Image (cartoon, rainbow, N blue to C red):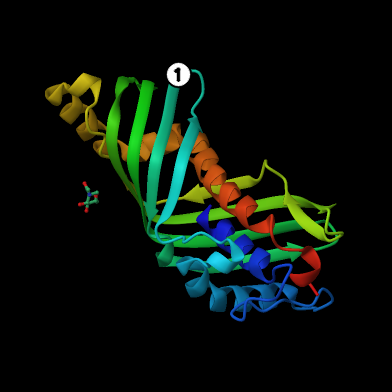
Amino acid sequence: MFRSLLVLVVVALAADAKKLASYIKPCKRDDPNLNECAKKNGLEAIPFLLKGDKEYKNPSLSPLLLPRLDVDAGANLKITFTDVTLRGLETVDFRDIKINLDKKTIFVQVALKALNLQGHYEIDGRILVLPIQGNGPCNLTFEDLVVNYGFKYELVKKEDGKNYINPNIKPDVTYTMKNVHFQFDNLFNGDKTLGDQTNKFLNENSGDINKDLGESISQTISAVVTNIIQLIVAVVPYDEIFI
Ligand SMILES: *[C@@H]1O[C@H](CO)[C@@H](O)[C@H](O)[C@H]1NC(C)=O
């Protein structure tokens, strides 16, 4: 997820309406090696992008602050995170990018060593067979996360007469990860015994939970990435990304 985010960030930040950020180089539309160009330029730009750039309205990505994350986990489970701090995007390894300008599709693969999510959670429902309910601080760590993020986009003309990338809000997202570490504080109205047991259960069954909640996790990843992408492509004309 975060992978694609970075790609897009890269792509999107290639330029802004005023001038090009010096650390981001555009790619030529007719470059037969467009993918390599995007990957190379993306890799070079990542450290700068992670820091954020006020001039380009690009928020810092390390850490990345998100006001709210709704997880659609189906009828049996509701999860909402608020005041989220995501750490670890700086461990990103930008593995692959495939751009098809004719079909207007972009695919990216990124790998992250460890992604840590801290913030406030609200959860209600069941995970596997276990009832879970509560709200409070949480601390989740996803280890060795590999995210594939593919999306279609349209070009829309804005008031300034320039075309901008408008990503489809329903991207294709798949991921793999090695392990998740869960810590939900204050579960069950602060019932410590029940809360400790539940956290223990979650951590001991993280593989099954990952399978069970896979779709929701994909959607969460997707929401985060899409969020970031939209922040960025909103200010960057297409013609200055792909010249
Ligand atoms: C969050 O979890 C990580 C890894 O499980 C741990 O190293 C860190 O100390 C925790 N931080 C807080 C504030 O609980």
**Quarter of the figure that contains the C terminus:** bottom right
Percent of width and height locating residue 95 = 55, 68
- 7 to 135, vertically: above or below: below
Residue at the (67%, 64%) spot, across then down: 12
Q: How many labels does the image show?
A: 1
Is 6 left or right of 97, judged from the image as shown? left
The residue indicated by pointer 1 is 76
Q: Kindly state the secondary structure of the residue where label 1 is placed.
A: loop
Give residue 31's quadrant in the image.
bottom right
Q: Nearer the viewer, residue 121 or 95?
A: 121
Residue lying at the far left in this picture: please name it. Answer: 193
Residue 127 visible here: no
Residue 232, placed above or below residue 43: above
Query: Amino acid type of disc 1?
Result: Asn
Q: Residue 62: x, y in percent?
A: 41, 61
Along the horizontal axis of the image, is 243 left or right of 90?
Answer: right
Q: Residue at x 36, y 25 (%)?
A: 123
Is the residue 135 above or below the residue 234 in the image? Answer: above
Q: Nearer the viewer, residue 150 or 5?
A: 5
Q: How crowded is mark 1: few (under 14 residues within 10 Å), some or many (20 or more)?
A: few
